[in-house]
Amino acid sequence: MTQSTTQQNGNGTVALAFSGGLDTTVCVPLLKEEYGYDDVIGVTVDVGQPDYEFDEAEETAEALGLEHYVVDATEAFADLCLDAVKANADYQGYPLGTSLARPVIAKAIADVASEQGCTALAHGCTGKGNDQLRFEAVWRDTDMDVIAPIRELGLTREWENEYAEEKGLPVEGGAGGRYSIDTNLWSRSIEGSELEDPATIPEDDIYLWTDNPSGKDAELVEITFEDGTAVAVDGEALGSVELIEALNERAGAHGIGRTDMMEDRMLGLKVRENYEHPAATVLLTAHEALEGLVLTQEERQFKTSIDQRWSEKAYEGLIDAPLVKDLEGFIEQTQSRVTGTVTVKLEGGHCRAVSRESDYSVYSESAASFNEEAVTGSITQDDATGVAKYHGFQSRLANRVTESLADDEE
C-alpha cells in the first residue's frame, strides 16, 4: 500500500458514497485506520438501480455495523435525463447516462453529510476513471474534505480482496461477478474482464435490458412532447420516471439501445464500453425528428454546436457550470416550439421516426410538393433560375483562375 498521500485528518465523521461492493466496503475500515476518522456513515442514492443492489448495500452495511442512509433521487435524475433530451445529449455517439447520474448522487450525499455534521466526504473511485472527477466537482464546492482511499492509497483489486479476506469483510470475490456494471434508470453499462479486449465479441448474456431482436414483429410507439419534454406515450400522460421505465421495457424488447464502443475518458485513457439505453435511444430519436419539423435551418445548424458543448460539460459532470446555464438559455428558447407528437417504429434492434406532427411546423406541403406549379403565391419555380446562376459562381471563378495560372506556368 502506498501511503505517501494519506491524510491523518483525525476526529470527525466522514460520509462515504456506499454501494456495498468491494471498493466501498474496504473503504469503511480504511477511513478509520489510515485516515483516523472517528466514524463513517454510508450513503446510497437511488437513481433507478435494481432492488438487489439496495439489498446488498443494506446487508453489507449491517454486517459492517455501518450507519446507512438511502436517498431517493430517482425523480430528480429522471427530470435531468429528459432535460438532456432537449440538448440531444450524447457523447461520442451514445446517450449520456452514468455522467448524468453522478452529480445527482454527489449532491444527495453532500446534503446528508451536511445534515449529519460530517467533516469529510469519501468515494471508492480509482484514479483511472471519470467518476472521481464528477463526484469531486460537486464536493469541492462544500466546506468538507474530500477523501479517495482507493486512488490515494494506490490500491488494486487483488490487494482489496486480500485485505477483505484478512479483515473478514462481507464481500464475495470482488463485486458480484466478472464485469463492472453500473445501472440507473437511463442506462446500463458493462465493462471489464474479457470485454477489455477490443477484439472480443461479447456474448448476449451481458445484456439484461435488451432482448435479441430477431423474429419480433415491428411496433409503433407515439411520443408526445411539450416544450421539448416528453410527457406521454401513446397518448397516456406519464411522469418522468414512469415514462422512461415504460420505454425501456417496450424498446428493450426489440433489442433497441445497445452500444459497443471505444470511449475516450476525460483523463485520456481509451476504454471499451458496452451500454444499454432503450428509452434514451427512442426519446432522442423522436425529439430530433420533432426539432427537424419545427426549427428553422439556421436554428438547427447552430443548435448542433450548442448541444455538443452541453453534452461535453454534462459528460464531465459539470452540469451546474455557468456555461451550461448560458447554453440552456438558447436551448430553452428553441424548445418553446418543440411541442407535438412523433411516431417511432421499433424493429430489429433499431428505431426510426416514421411520422411527426406539430402546430409549430414550418413545413409547407404545397410549397414542397412536386404536384404544385408555384412555390407560393408570389414565388414561382422560375424564380430559382437566377439563384441557380449565382450558386457556385465564386467556386467556378476560383477554379478557372487556378487553371489559368497553371497553364501560364507551363
Image (cartoon, grey):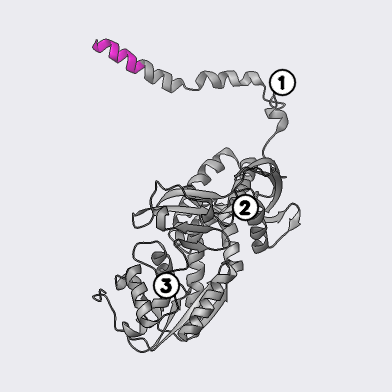
Residue 157 is situated, as x and y percent measured from the top left of the image, at 35, 68
Can you see residue 110?
A: yes
- What SS does tag 1 mark? loop
Residue plotted at (71% across, 48% down): 222
- The disc at residue 22 is 3
Residue plotted at (67% across, 58% down): 246
**Mark 3 nearby-residue class (10 Å; few <14, some 14–19, many ≥20):** many
Q: Which region shows up in magenta?
A: 401-410
In the depicted structure, whether residue 358 falls above or below residue 65:
above
Q: Which residue is mark 2?
A: 252
Mark 3: which amino acid? Leu
Q: Which residue is mark 1?
A: 373
Residue 294 is situated, as x and y percent measured from the top left of the image, at 65, 43
Mark 1: which amino acid? Glu
Task: Decide whether the magenta segment is chiefly helix, strand or loop.
Answer: helix
Residue plotted at (50% across, 22% down): 391
- Measure the C-alpha gap from mark 1 to mark 2: 46 Å
**Mark 2 nearby-residue class (10 Å; few <14, some 14–19, many ≥20):** many
In the depicted structure, whether residue 166 falls above or below residue 315:
below
Q: Quadrant of residue 354?
A: top right
Residue 238 is situated, as x and y percent measured from the top left of the image, at 71, 60
The quadrant the N terminus occupies is bottom left
